[in-house]
Image: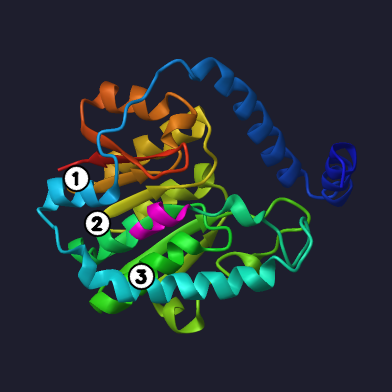
Amino acid sequence: MNRMSFFFQIITKNIFKPKNLVNLAKEKVETQDDINHKTHEYEYNFNSIEEFFKNKFHQTNLTQYESELNELEEHVKVFFKEIDLEKYPSAKKPYPSDYSINPNARKFLYLLCRILKPKIIVETGVAYGLSSFYILKALEKNNLGKLYSIDSVFRPWQTERMIGSIIPQNLKERWTLVLGTSNKKLQQVFDNLEDVDIFIHDSLHTYKNMMFEFECAINKLRQGIIISDDVLENDAFHDFTREHNVKNSIINVKDKSGLGIIETT
């Protein structure tokens, strides 16, 4: 599908869904505005997730989780083997295969949840649900915790059914999916929860949206951790952490990206 056909399909299939067109327009404008917010050169504080855990939690024996992680990766391989047979964009493949959180980042989320044993986690951005899957599996192993995820459907080939489609049914009892954009739903979710231990940003990676989500999260998490994928894409992580003078670090997750960590304790 060429670019013209791609956008024509979006417009024609959303012609009677003005909210979807508004969301798409906002995304386009914010993405374009990010050209003005890419001035800071980031440096990694940790060159691996193993280095992070050794430094922050004195946790050096991560090998005890290897079999659990291998089991998760096998599930991912089987899922994408089927998905990759489908054509993108389509109802059966609404997101590109490389749209998902990278292996090192999802490994980090699993280990963090296994070690910290959080009670409440909130995340934005789900897609196929790889991060959600890893988190929910960790919560199951801990026999503790719930995950609240926010994601939206506004492209014509996307459906609610495919959001989190990698998540096995037996893990969904600890999962609540909230449909909508984070700028409409995130504060509502926070308001309905007494405490939140971990917040994960992985939705629209624009300066405006990241700053909004970070602000909501820091006002809610009195003692917790804020995690952001793809912090190297703009200056939001840099500007926010300096504005609030919070302890932070960036982990190299090996894909020319960075996983940003903010400690609110």
Side of 200 where 23 appears, left or right: right
Whether pointer 1 and pointer 2 mark residues with C-beta atoms closer than 8 Å, the reply is yes
Q: Residue placed at 35% from the left, 25% from the top?
A: 238
Q: Residue at x 71, y 34 (%)?
A: 25
Secondary structure found at label 1: loop
Residue visible at 55% across and 67% down? 164
Residue 38 rendering spot, x and y as whole percentages: 49, 19
Q: Earlier in the sequence, mark 1 or mark 2?
A: 2
**Magenta region includes residue 105:** yes
Separation (CA) of disc 3 from disc 2: 28 Å
Residue 61: image location, x then y, percent: 15, 64
Q: Which residues are magenta?
A: 102-107
Q: Quarter of the image holding residue 82?
A: bottom right
Tag 2 residue = 195
* Residue that carries the numbered disc 1 in the rendered image: 222
Q: Three-letter amino acid code at disc 1?
A: Arg
